[in-house]
Amino acid sequence: MKNGTWMLAGLSLLGLTVLAVVPMAALYRLALAVMIAVCWIAVWTLQKRMAELEAEEKRHQEKLLAQQKMLHMINHLRHDWMNDIQVLLGYIQLKKYDHLHAVMSNIMGKLQDESHLAKLGDPALIMFLLSCRTGAKHMQLEVELEKEVNLRQLSLNGEAVCRLIPELIEGFKQASAGENEEGSVLNMQIVPEEDSLLLDFVYQGVYVRKELQAALEHVVRSGAGRSVNAVVEQSDYQEQEAAFALRLPYQTSVEV
């Protein structure tokens, strides 16, 4: 299709040259002008079609990638649940019934965490957090939600908050030691309070301090952080531990 476009463009340019240089009767000039116009219309149509095909191919690839991520998450979650069930069945077979309470408490805790996570109110954010939990290679993400919270129903710019959280997590991920370092853990708590939302992060593991500070400061000062008036509540950087907390004040309506 690209070769056809170039051919039509070449023909139209040749026609313009002939029209400008070669003397001819008015009727022939009109016919040539019509041919040039047809060529340019064809070029524009082909280019538009090529752009549509490229956009369609891009959407198809993005859809395939999203499906692959979804399958990976499902397989990872299935593997985790199978491990819990096998431990449970093992204690039952060994008649170690006194261990069952701890296992069931752990399972119920996981169910509650996943239930709270699924009700954050933003599908893209939920998918991102799940992918970080199940697909992390060098930094494990733990999300703690003591109760259900729908970020879209708070007196905040919900869209900005749902952009801000992934940006902060990516900041920790980029500053961490990398794929060759194992054992890094990022714990995130989302705590809705009376007048604000608290985002509390605790990172444990090797990291580049200057890079993490710069990344977090940039996120707070950028569009998402600015639009929710994020206030740094805590910023503490130790050798292999970092604590960072943001307070997002709720918006209040002003009556005139």
Image (cartoon, rainbow, N blue to C red):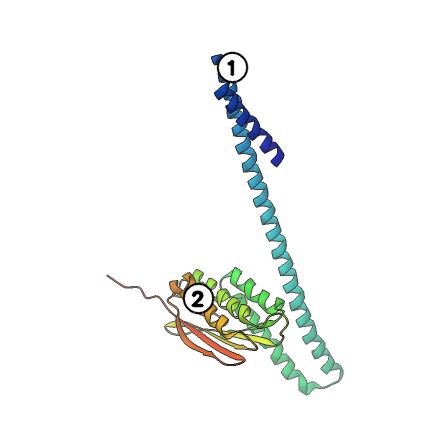
- Which residue is located at x 75 percent, y 84 percent? 94
Which sits in the foreground, 26 or 1?
A: 26
User: Is residue 1 in view from this perspective?
Assistant: no
Q: Which numbered marker is on residue 28?
A: 1
Q: Secondary structure at mark 2?
A: helix
Q: Amino acid at mark 2?
A: His
Q: Quadrant of the C terminus?
A: bottom left
Which sits in the foreground, 51 or 187?
A: 51
Q: Secondary structure at mark 1?
A: helix
Which sits in the foreground, 40 or 126?
A: 40
Which is nearer the N-term, disc 1 or disc 2?
Answer: 1
Q: Amino acid at mark 1?
A: Tyr
Q: Position of residue 175 (x, y in %)?
A: 53, 70
User: What residue sits right under mark 2 in the picture?
Assistant: 218
- Mark 2, residues whose alpha carbon is within 10 Å: few (<14), some, or many (≥20)? some
Q: Quadrant of the N terminus?
A: top right
Q: Which numbered marker is on residue 181?
A: none
Quarter of the image where one finds residue 220: bottom left
Is residue 219 positioned above or below 60 on the image?
below
